[in-house]
Image (cartoon, rainbow, N blue to C red):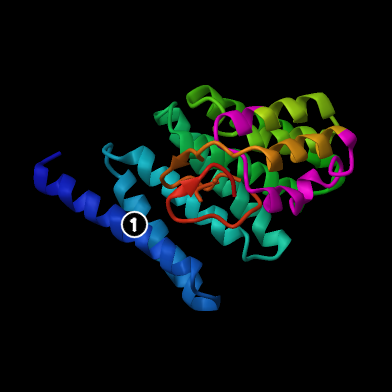
Amino acid sequence: MSLLSSFKKRSTLDAAIKQVAQARKSEGSKAEQLYKGAYQGFANVIADHLIVSEALYHWGFGLLHEARTQEPKAAIEIYEDAISKFSFCLLISPNYLGAAIDGGVAFMELARISAEAAKPDLYDLAEDFFEKACAIQKGSAAYNLACVYALRGDNDACLAALQTAREFGSLPDEQNILQDDDMAGVINAPWFKAFMEEVSATPAPEKTRIKDVEINVEPGFKIEKKEDFDYYS
């Protein structure tokens, strides 16, 4: 690809990323139009082999946010589309941390709107993505894993994951943890209260940051993310 062609691809990708950002701040038909315009831009970038993984990630990132604005029936299809983009991104770039984290986030959010019988398998798939993220960068999705374990009632694994998240600076703020629906099943457990007391009593390590990860990071958790991203949503 020529230098000029490469520059045009980069410009197209940057414009599509900005459209997703604008769409997230918009509503109704305007948001829908912006998302569709962004997706076309991502598709144009993928037509060649440069920066394909980045385009796939941001395409999935846009779909993940769009799904949150839809009714469950429509959202399920959009979440599945987002997951396919994150999966393809990881196929091309196995160490793309954002895709690993946000793929797991997408499965977690899909589980929340799916039938009870489907939830265990979706949590398993989310766990696979989060473990991939931690293999890429240790502790990066430890809190996400803690959420999966809490939902399963695996207290020992949940505590270990929370401790890892704290050690590596990816633990959300105390208020966010206490308000996290995924932690509802363990929040009154003595071991959880003891952990939170310890967190409150000692300074938290500096949070690890990653650009463009939605983490359940905003890049992708349940907390609203910022634009240069902590490891939890």
Q: Observer-nearest residue: 6 or 192?
A: 192
Q: Which residues are magenta?
A: 164-190
Q: How many marks?
A: 1
* Residue 82 locus on image (x, y percent): 54, 47
Looking at the image, residue 181 sits to the left or right of residue 80; the answer is right
Indicate the quadrant where residue 210 lies: top left
Q: Considering only vertical position in the picture, is 114 above or below 38?
A: above
Any part of residue 125 in sight? no
Say whether residue 142 is left or right of residue 230: right
- Residue for point 47% across, 34% down: 97
Name, please, the residue furthest toward the left: 3
Q: Which residue is mark 1?
A: 41
Residue 174 falls within the magenta-colored stretch: yes
Residue found 76% across the figure and 29% down from its top: 159
Was residue 178 drawn as part of the magenta stretch in this picture? yes
Q: Quadrant of residue 168?
A: top right
Amino acid type of the residue tagged 1 in the rendering: Gly
Residue positioned 59% across, 34% down in the render = 141
Residue lying at the far right in this picture: please name it: 189
